[in-house]
Image: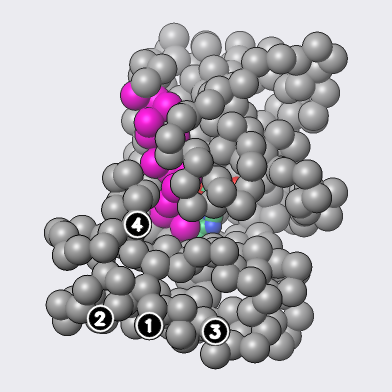
Amino acid sequence: MEVIRIPRIMREISKELRFKGKSIGFIPTMGALHEGHLSLIRRAKEENDIVIVSIFVNPTQFAQGEDYEKYPRDVELDKEKLEALAIDYLFLPDVNSLYPEGYSTYVVVEGLSDKLCGIFRPGHFRGVATIVCKLFNIVKPLRAYFGQKDYQQSLIIRRMVEDLNFDIEIIVCPTVREQDGLAMSSRNLYLNEKERQSATVIYKALKEGERLLNKGEKPLDVKLKMHEILKNEPLIREIQYAGVYDPLTLEEVKERQNKYLLAVALKIGDTRLIDNLIVE
Ligand code: AMP
């Protein structure tokens, strides 16, 4: 595995690889790698000649007062995990190389960015779309891999790729969970033992929502039931959203339809957690 820190050099390597006809699979991450990330990397390895992973804690996607400073960073451990998977390149840029003095261009995917997480994290998806756009231009992948865990993000990236005519296939991989159902996340590291235990209620609420939808219950009743389950967990400080949404528009769904997105965002202590399920 080669570690590349300078965007210009990464771009030159990728250009040459593409010129030689190699397919590049790309996985953008913010590090603190766990099995969720590694599952995307394994999939990319199966489907491409070359695999490039980026680790970059992107400041522009953190809203004021969020956890940018304390976001978990352990590059040495991450490198070991990536070495073990024998990826080809780790792209590890620093903030100044991607956002130098005078930086002023941003990508906004309108509409979708203002729903769900967008309501509680102003500017978040503008930061995400901008950094992914930049990384796509540097790494020039044929395929890029994202997790369903961040469903709204994957939808926004797909929209951006279509709207801006990127020639990149977006592949969304299933959410990897702990044994008790909690979706793996770098932010789970923030949870103390009691909080970690209480976080299992998220998956329970989603699974109950799924069961009720499959039984034919109305989306609005399903939402109420999910809230009831979550409210019974004393360590949950704030439920930001929980309910049944349209998987394409992210609008709340009130009547029965063919496919639903069940999604939850909440805070346990200071830790914000999200999860979702698609129900057909
Ligand atoms: P992050 O480092 O949190 O920005 O995540 C990098 C990529 O890994 C994103 O595409 C995430 O959706 C994906 N990811 C994070 N957690 C999981 C998980 N538990 N299962 C599958 N993919 C995940």
Q: Please, what is the dominant secondary structure of the magenta stretch?
A: helix
Height in image: 23 above or below 214? above
**Residue type at mark 2?**
Leu
Q: Disc 3 designates what residue? A: 231
The stretch in magenta equals: 148-162
Height in image: 101 above or below 277? above
Q: Can you tell which of label 3 and label 2 is closer to the viewer?
A: 3
Residue pictured at 20% horizontal, 63% vertical? 255
Q: Can you tell which of label 4 and label 2 is closer to the viewer?
A: 4
Q: Disc 1 designates what residue? A: 225
Q: Nearer the viewer, residue 108 or 177?
A: 108
Measured in 3D between alpha carbons, the distance from the residue under mark 1 to the one under mark 4, in whole angstroms, is 15 Å
Circle nearer the N terminus (3, 4): 3
Measured in 3D between alpha carbons, the distance from the residue under mark 4 to the one under mark 2, in whole angstroms, is 17 Å
Disc 4 packing (10 Å; few <14; some 14–19; many ≥20): some
- 208 vs 115, left or right, is left
Q: Find out if the beta carbon at label 1 lies less than 8 Å from the nearest ligand 1 atom.
A: no
Instruction: Please say whether residue 258 is one of the residues in the magenta stretch.
Output: no
**Residue type at mark 4?**
Glu
Give how far across and how far down residue 100 sits, in percent: 81, 17
Circle nearer the N terminus (1, 4): 1
Q: Are marks 1 and 3 in contact (CB under 8 Å)?
A: no
Circle nearer the N terminus (3, 2): 2
Disc 3 packing (10 Å; few <14; some 14–19; many ≥20): some
- 110 vs 8, left or right, is left
Badge 4 element: loop
Height in image: 41 above or below 161? below
